[in-house]
């Protein structure tokens, strides 16, 4: 079976995670590529072919102006009702509803929705951390497009073939805690299809696909950390992934027919 987008032995025995810090507070209109190269120069790190560069979704959102003043949010009756049920800020609930394609579940103080992007998670990714009081940050409008744009800009200036991933922290069904997952990707496929491969005993894999883009973002998240956002960019080096410009975050998402949890 064809392993589209990946080398046969897409494995490594050595992985390096390089945090890029020292960026200023990100504002609307800031050029993340410029800021990346300035911080990279200060860090004295040279890019290499094959590097995967993970950006937190929050700095992408801030640079693109996806920050909302809660005072300006008009609250609907539905938002007021859900806010009362969940003991949440009504303006915040309204933002969640605005970003939602479908409400999956409201339980205790948690609102699980499917966002307009197709992601399923708590509060539609609307976040009040690492932003001024009274404001909230939304997920990037189109993280796939943002990843493609940043990759092209970095490659043009560095003359290296790299990939870019937009990362956010999400929870998982039946697991406590959050981990980094991929919101958008450019330069590699998101999945490593292992179907058709033999294991050590000669048995053929029939259903296994490895969510490589999510694994990269989870690894980067170990360096980025939570809340402080002092390391919003991480270079993941040592992967043996074949280059592809056809990779898309939608490869990671179940369609409704295959979603066993809903």
Image (cartoon, rainbow, N blue to C red):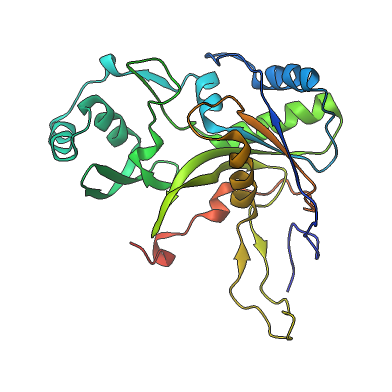
Identify which residue is drawn at 74% across, 69% down.
2
Work out whether 97 lies above or below 3: above
Quarter that holds the N terminus: bottom right
Work out whether 247 lies above or below 71: below
Identify which residue is drawn at 22% across, 32% down.
88
Q: Is residue 108 left or right of residue 197?
A: left
Identify which residue is drawn at 62% across, 32% down.
55
Q: Nearer the viewer, residue 43 or 104?
A: 43
List x then y, in percent, for residue 5. Answer: 74, 57
Whether residue 188 is visible, yes or no, is yes
Q: Is residue 77 left or right of residue 61?
A: left
Q: Is residue 186 left or right of residue 237?
A: left
Residue farthest to the bottom, as pictured: 202
Q: Which quadrant of the view contains residue 53?
A: top right
Q: Nearer the viewer, residue 170 or 73?
A: 170
List x then y, in percent, for residue 52. Answer: 73, 41
Whether residue 173 is visible, yes or no, is no
Identify which residue is drawn at 17% across, 38% down.
82
Q: Which quadrant of the view contains residue 127?
A: top left
Q: Is residue 81 left or right of residue 168?
A: left
Work out whether 149 lies above or below 253: above
Work out whether 204 lies above or below 128: below
| Total numbered labels placed on residues in the image | 0
List x then y, in percent, for residue 202. Answer: 74, 86
Q: Which quadrant of the view contains residue 85?
A: top left
Quarter that holds the C terminus: bottom left
């Amino acid at each position: 079976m064809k392993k589209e987008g990946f080398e046969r032995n897409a494995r490594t025995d050595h992985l390096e995670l390089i945090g890029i810090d020292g960026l200023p507070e990100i504002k609307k209109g800031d050029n993340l590529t410029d800021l990346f190269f300035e911080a990279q120069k200060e860090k004295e790190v040279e890019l290499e072919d094959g590097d995967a560069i993970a950006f937190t979704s929050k700095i992408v959102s801030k640079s693109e102006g996806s920050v909302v003043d809660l005072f300006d949010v008009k609250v609907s009756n539905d938002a007021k009702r859900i806010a009362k049920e969940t003991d949440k800020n009504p303006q915040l609930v309204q933002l969640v509803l605005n970003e939602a394609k479908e409400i999956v579940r409201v339980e205790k103080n948690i609102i699980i929705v499917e966002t307009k992007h197709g992601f399923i998670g708590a509060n539609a990714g609307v976040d009040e951390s690492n932003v001024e009081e009274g404001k909230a940050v939304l997920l990037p409008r189109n993280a796939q497009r943002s990843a493609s744009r940043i990759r092209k800009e970095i490659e043009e200036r560095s003359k290296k073939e790299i990939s870019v991933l937009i990362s956010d922290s999400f929870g998982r069904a039946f697991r406590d805690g959050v981990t980094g997952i991929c919101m958008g990707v450019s330069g590699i496929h998101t999945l490593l299809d292992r179907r058709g491969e033999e294991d050590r005993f000669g048995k053929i894999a029939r259903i296994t696909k490895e969510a490589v883009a999510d694994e990269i973002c989870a690894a980067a998240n170990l360096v980025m950390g939570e809340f402080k956002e002092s390391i919003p960019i991480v270079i993941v080096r040592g992967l043996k992934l074949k280059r592809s410009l056809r990779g898309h975050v939608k490869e990671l998402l179940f369609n409704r027919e295959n979603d066993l949890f809903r």
